[in-house]
Image (cartoon, grey):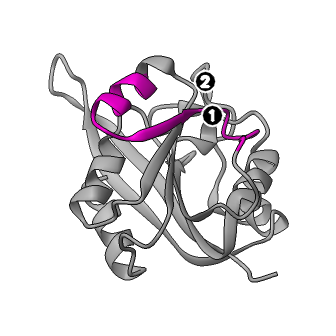
Amino acid sequence: MDHMIPKFVNEYNLDETKKILDIGCGQGYGMLKFNELGCTNVSGLTLSKEDADAARERGFDVVEDDMSFQTAEDNTYDVLFARHSLEHSPYPLLTLLEFYRVLKPGGLAYIEMPSPQCTRLLEEYDNHYAIMGIRQWRALMTRAGFKDLDIGELKFGISNNQTGEDIGEEVYEWYVLEKLNV
């Protein structure tokens, strides 16, 4: 987040006028980073009461909601930030359609998730339902109505926490999407 949020904010001229939703906000670290960069109209969404309470203690507005069935009205947000949340959806096309619904026409979505190229087999984690490659994700994102503006990968080595031994590489895919004006 320390690298990608500033990149996203700067490349797409985000500021306090943009209404941003951090989907899967955890305890508010991403919202804090947006605030530090002048994006102060940011709120969060999480299913975890514990995370929501912790983010609220930091001063953030957080809704405890399912990303696939949000209570927000149509065309509510200028920007969606979904870092490591979409892979937790058992129905990613449905979730992408929901992202499209709550995003304003011309709005942007940043989506980042693990790639099947990770050394760790993240698709085998109990709470990971959708670990797919760029081709499959782009097909779903297009079907949901999005236009892709930018796509990239983040790669970094990982090591065993106890021994420090190098155990492989993590690969994350990221997408910047636009909801077309309809």
For label 1, the crowd category at 10 Å Cα-Cα, with few meaning under 14, some 14 to 19 and many 20 or more, is some
Residue 77: x and y in percent read 60, 62
Residue at horizontal 21 percent and vertical 22 percent from the top: 161
Does residue 106 appear left or right of residue 158 in this picture? right
Does residue 122 appear left or right of residue 8 in this picture? right
User: Mark 2: which secondary structure?
Assistant: loop
Tag shown at residue 127: 2
Q: Mark 1 points at which residue?
A: 88
Residue 72: x and y in percent read 69, 48
Find out whether the residues at labels 1 and 2 contact each other: C-beta distance under 8 Å.
Answer: yes
Residue at horizontal 75 percent and vertical 45 percent from the top: 92
Residue at horizontal 36 percent and vertical 73 percent from the top: 15
Give the mark, 1 or 2, whose residue is nearer the N terminus.
Answer: 1
Location of the C terminus (image quadrant): bottom right
Q: How far apart are marks 1 and 2 (CA)?
A: 6 Å
Residue at horizontal 37 percent and vertical 31 percent from the top: 56
